[in-house]
Image (spheres, coloured by chain):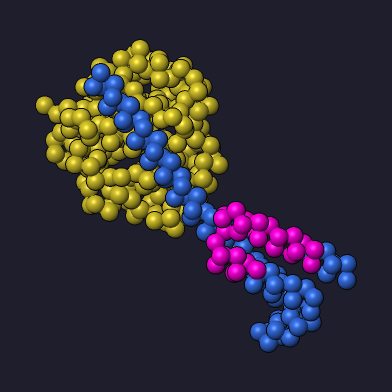
Chain colours: A blue, B yellow
Amino acid sequence: MIIQIALFIFILYVCSRIIIRYRSSDVTGRELTLWLVFWFLVALAVVFPHKTDRLAQFVGVERGADLLVYISIIALFFIGFKIIVRLEKIDRAITTVVRRTALDRQSKSDDQ
Amino acid sequence: MEKTCVIIPAFNEAAVIGEVIGAVKQYADTTLVIDDGSTDQTADVARRAGATVLRHLVNRGQGAAIQTGITAALRGTADIIITFDADGQFLANEIGRVIDPIIRGQADVVLGSRFLPSVATVPGQAPQRISYSKKTVLKVATAITRLYTGLAVTDTHNGFRALSRQAARLIELRQNGMAHASEILEQIRKYDLRVVEVPVTVRYTEYSVMKGQKLSGILQIIWDLLMSRFAR
């Protein structure tokens, strides 16, 4: 019960932050909708945990909480992979800029 | 007569870069130092020693510095581009040996190897011995690179190499760090370039050992090679 209340308060807080981001145009309307739907589903799972048990058993896992953990781990690995790829690309872009700057400065000093 | 350009990537090598440039200048038409975001006086010392210096505003890694050097060399008239370490481990008087196969038309890329039988280099001095741990690290790196590239070279992480202008135009290093050595081999294979190994001397001074590659560097190289596959 305590954990449910705590999680529900946390979900309300996260939703309020998303709405604030939407109002300052950091998040699009589409992203707002997607995130609110996601957190609504999480809230349902928190309020009606036994419903998740039925879904879990349907896919072959005993408890809803276990299913949510498995899904979360997979999602985190995927997000981690995307971040690594993105960082690699950013790293290359930085090198391109640093190289270009070094070469351009060299060209300028050759001209002088 | 082929024009030669020696590229020296350098990071915080103010202590030795002047001496290295002084030696290299005698054997190359152009000496290009790529200061890879050094926090000491590397660039100033290099300029005073007579090298042309390009500066990276921030440190990017040896691979990035070498590619910057290659790009700069190709903007000039160099026919042969030589990479040479800044820490004084290599002997400048061996540049001739390294570029010879290219001049003779026998190779597009020449790789230096410390594991090939070498002639005596420093009169009166016994041949340098590599420490067991260092040798193990290098052998592991060589084995991994052979698996990765399929090329049977003996010393995959030796910074003393030469490229013909045509080879330098084809090769594009995207690895910023030490994995560039493996990447060069990968591209040699990709473009079917003729590669030859020649023996070179590697002097292990206290300074160069301190700055040299650690075992953890091998893990970083493997990681960089794997991650770069996903970011293509």
For the magenta stretch, what is the residue range? A8-36
Q: Residue furthest right?
A: A2
| Point 27% across, 27% down: residue | A107
x, y percent for residue B164: 20, 38
Asked if the stretch drawn in magenta spans residue A13, the answer is yes
Q: Which percent across, then down, holds residue B178?
A: 44, 40
Image coords of residue B45 (percent x, y): 40, 15
In the image: residue B47, left or right of residue A31: left
Q: Quadrant of residue B53?
A: top left
Relative side of B131 to B232, left or right: right
Q: Quadrant of the C terminus of chain B?
A: bottom left
At horizontal 74% and vertical 60% (from top left) the residue drawn is A13
Tell me if residue B176 comes above or below residue B31 in the rendering.
Answer: below
Considering depth in this image, is B122 or B6 the residue closer to the camera? B6
Q: Main secondary structure of the magenta part?
A: helix
Along the line of sight, the residue nearer the viewer: A54 or B191 = A54
Q: Residue at x 79, y 67 (%)?
A: A8
Residue that sits furthest to the top in the current view: B48
